[in-house]
Image: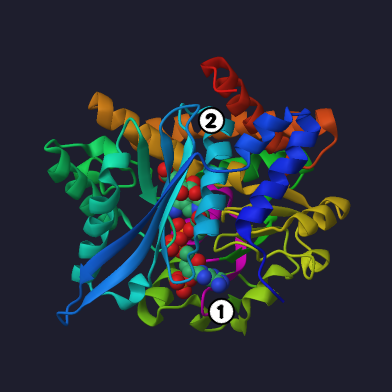
Amino acid sequence: MTKSNPFEIAQKQLDDCAKILNLDPGVHEFLRHPRREFHVSIPVRMDDGSIKIFQGYRVQYNDALGPCKGGIRYHPDETIDTVRALAAWMTWKTSLLGLPLGGGKGGVICNPKELSTGEQERLCRGYVDMVWQNIGPERDVPAPDVYTTPQMMAWMMDEYSKLTGSNNFGCITGKPLCVGGSCGRSDATARGGMYALREAARELGIDLSRATIAIQGYGNAGSYAHSLAKELFGSKVVAVSDSKGGAFNPAGIEPAEASSVKAETCTVASIPDAKRISNEELLELNVDILIVAALENVITKENAGNIKAKIILELANGPTTPEADEILFNNKVHVIPDFLANAGGVTVSYFEMVQNIMRYCWSFEEVYQRLDERMTMAYQGVLAASRQYNINMRQAAYTVAVARVVDAMKTRGWV
Ligand SMILES: NC(=O)C1=CN([C@@H]2O[C@H](COP(=O)(O)OP(=O)(O)OC[C@H]3O[C@@H](n4cnc5c(N)ncnc54)[C@H](OP(=O)(O)O)[C@@H]3O)[C@@H](O)[C@H]2O)C=CC1
Ligand SMILES: O=C(O)CCC(=O)C(=O)O
């Protein structure tokens, strides 16, 4: 089976939306492509003295609503088309949440698990050396994504600050708290997802305190989703997974146990007293809620019909193909689509930018409250659009987000 191209999927989703909104063909064509992209070669001195060249990208998809915003992914399978898709989804995400920001994304083809700390630092600084003239608080503000960390954001911010000769904390978000990070950014993606899940469960009449959950992916998004589902709702997480496989225990898996096993063995698949399962099996478990928090293209036409969950919370970007979306909609599975479900991360990143620029330091409570307001408003807006047009939640999210970007482009006189 050939893997679907994420950018073709993003374009197909936009094409469907263009029909619903009856978009002008020229405007539609403009939105099908990034406005700008940078391809860079980054030389890094390795610990053995050799020089290795890494290929990196930054895509600035659309900045009609404000400076571009979006993470940087480090992954061995990174491609320019994945970065383009992620940048397009960032554009719809910031718009949907009502943030005064556009959409961008970056990526470097590498496996950070195979790099020493020193090599990681030199790669982060090298990436910024290549793109610094094209990023910054007024242009494009990167953040963490898959396999990039707050420490990496700190090195990037420091490199940018050195190059610009100023302490430029607002040039990057997702930083550690001691160098201009925001309270609540580390668990923001999962927390925002929990607020959306709460709204969906209320609407469908599902009692989250009695619900069972399976979570694919156990990094930033997935591991915090585990602990927050327990803390906020008392839900029972029965299965978790990462790149090495999964673990299933119908009696429930405790977040502390999963985290400590992962820290010790580098995988949650080895949780004692749990049955080892594959990532594919996890998706089809008989649970109330499925949280996908790893990579793209995991719910496809091959497995969508076997999904038993009533709600799918897409913390990952692009986990569901368009064919699978149709099957899920027909089977009445309620999908909370990626650029709504996982928008908590960029929302708190926006709060971080605001705090950096204004020299504010908000408390956890202030951040949580503002995040809850934005997520609830966005969720209810998407739900209303899905009812108005009788379309699925992803199509509804597209109509709201794209209409705002088009409005800004027209008002600015671009189209
Ligand atoms: N971090 C953020 O703020 C945001 C993240 N997202 C999206 O959430 C998703 C996860 O990102 P994040 O948690 O930050 O990334 P992390 O790097 O923290 O974690 C990624 C997780 O996915 C797992 N994984 C990787 N490949 C596979 C695979 N083939 N099958 C199953 N699991 C796999 C990894 O496994 P292992 O631990 O074994 O490496 C890891 O547990 C991505 O789609 C990202 O774009 C969206 C919005 C914001
Ligand atoms: O925090 C951010 O700016 C962006 C996070 C991100 O990359 C995403 O939402 O996919």
Magenta includes 223? Answer: yes
Task: Pinpoint residue 406: horizontal percent, then vertical percent.
Answer: 62, 26
* Amino acid marked by disc 2: Arg
Q: How crowded is mark 2: few (under 14 residues within 10 Å), some or many (20 or more)?
A: many
Q: Which SS class for mark 2?
A: helix
Q: How crowded is mark 1: few (under 14 residues within 10 Å), some or many (20 or more)?
A: many
Q: In this view, does 127 lie above or below 337?
A: below
Q: Which mark is residue 404?
A: none
Q: What stretch is highlighted in magenta?
A: 217-244
Left or right of residue 54: residue 303: right
Mark positioned earlier in the residue sequence (1 or 2): 1
Q: In this view, does 83 lie above or below 168?
A: below
Left or right of residue 316: residue 45: left
Residue at figure coordinates x 73%, y 58% from the top left? 288
* Amino acid marked by disc 1: Gly
Residue furthest out toward the front: 26
Magenta includes 263? Answer: no
Of residues 349 and 407, the one drawn nearer to the viewer in this rendering: 407
The answer to whether residue 326 of the structure is visible from this angle is yes
Rendered image quadrant of residue 256: bottom left
Q: Mark 2 points at which residue?
A: 374
Rendered image quadrant of residue 381: top right
Residue at figure coordinates x 15%, y 44% from the top left? 163
Q: Which SS class for mark 1?
A: strand
Task: Pinpoint residue 41: horizontal percent, then vertical percent.
Answer: 32, 62
Task: Pinpoint residue 207: horizontal percent, then vertical percent.
Answer: 71, 48
Q: Please state, as top left, top right, bottom left or bottom right, where the C terminus lies in the image.
A: top right
Residue at figure coordinates x 65%, y 63% from the top left? 297
Task: Pinpoint residue 73: horizontal percent, then vertical percent.
Answer: 42, 58
Q: Is residue 384 above or below residue 103?
A: above
Disc 1 to disc 2, C-alpha distance: 34 Å
Q: Mark 1 points at which residue?
A: 245
